[in-house]
Amino acid sequence: MPLPSIDDYPERYRYRYCPRCATELVLAHLHDMDRQRCPACGWIHYALPNLAATVVVEYQGGIVLVQRDINPDRGIWHLPIGHVEYGEDPAEAAIREGQEETGLTLAEPRFLSYSFGPSYGDPRMFYVVLGFSARAVGGALTGSDEGRGTMVLPLDALPPLKWDSQREAIAAYRESVIRSWESGSRSR
Ligand SMILES: [Zn+2]
């Protein structure tokens, strides 16, 4: 697949003026691609994908799902997920988002998988989503009367999740559970 050109960029990356000095940007061929460059201060527009983290929360023998409270897709059930802040370790972002969305205190983030693909909200925007697991070690699960709804389901009873990134995280989590079960059996 050819990489997107400037004309394919999502709306939020359609810059006309330099964000640093407000000079009109010009096209320049740099590092084998057409890029926007500021003729005054030299700023170059390197468009990046969004970075997000999602987390498989282990709680009372099950996995925590939260209910989406914004459109599109308000009401669907999903794993806690959110954007990684600038300067934030993605594992810390997974813990933070998981705690914010469930009310639980989380620990032991473990990397499971990553996914890359277009945003379902805007197919011209790309996402890298890093999947982690984490264990609940305290706090209290928020109920639907305290904000967003939550539910806990056994791993084998999870409904199909809408987003690729979350299906991939669950698949990687399942494999890690099987692997640890197998190594546990061998050591017995
Ligand atoms: Zn500039």
Image (tube, rainbow, N blue to C red):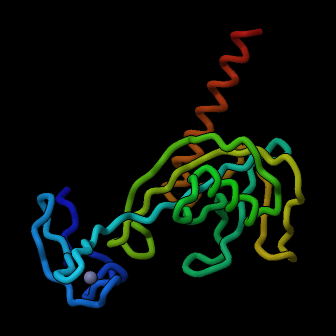
Q: Nearer the viewer, residue 82 or 31?
A: 31
> Please, which residue is most extreme toward the front here?
41
Q: Height in image: 136 above or below 8? A: above
Q: Nearer the viewer, residue 57 or 83?
A: 83
Q: Residue at x 58, y 41 (%)?
A: 111
Residue 55 seen from this side: yes
In this figure, what is the number of numbered marks?
A: 0
Q: Position of residue 87 (x, y in %)?
A: 53, 60
Q: Horizontal placement of 103 versus 111: left or right?
A: right
Residue 184 placement: quadrant: top right
Residue 101 placement: quadrant: bottom right
Residue 154 seen from this side: no
Quadrant of image for the N terminus: bottom left
Q: Residue at x 44, y 70 (%)?
A: 120
Quadrant of image for the C terminus: top right
Q: Position of residue 90 (x, y in %)?
A: 57, 53
Q: Position of residue 96 (x, y in %)?
A: 69, 59
Q: Residue at x 27, y 75 (%)?
A: 9
Q: Horizontal placement of 146 versus 33: left or right?
A: right
Q: Horizontal placement of 4 versus 102: left or right?
A: left
- Where does ligand 1 appear, by image quarter? bottom left
Q: Position of residue 75 (x, y in %)?
A: 67, 74
Q: Residue at x 60, y 56 (%)?
A: 54
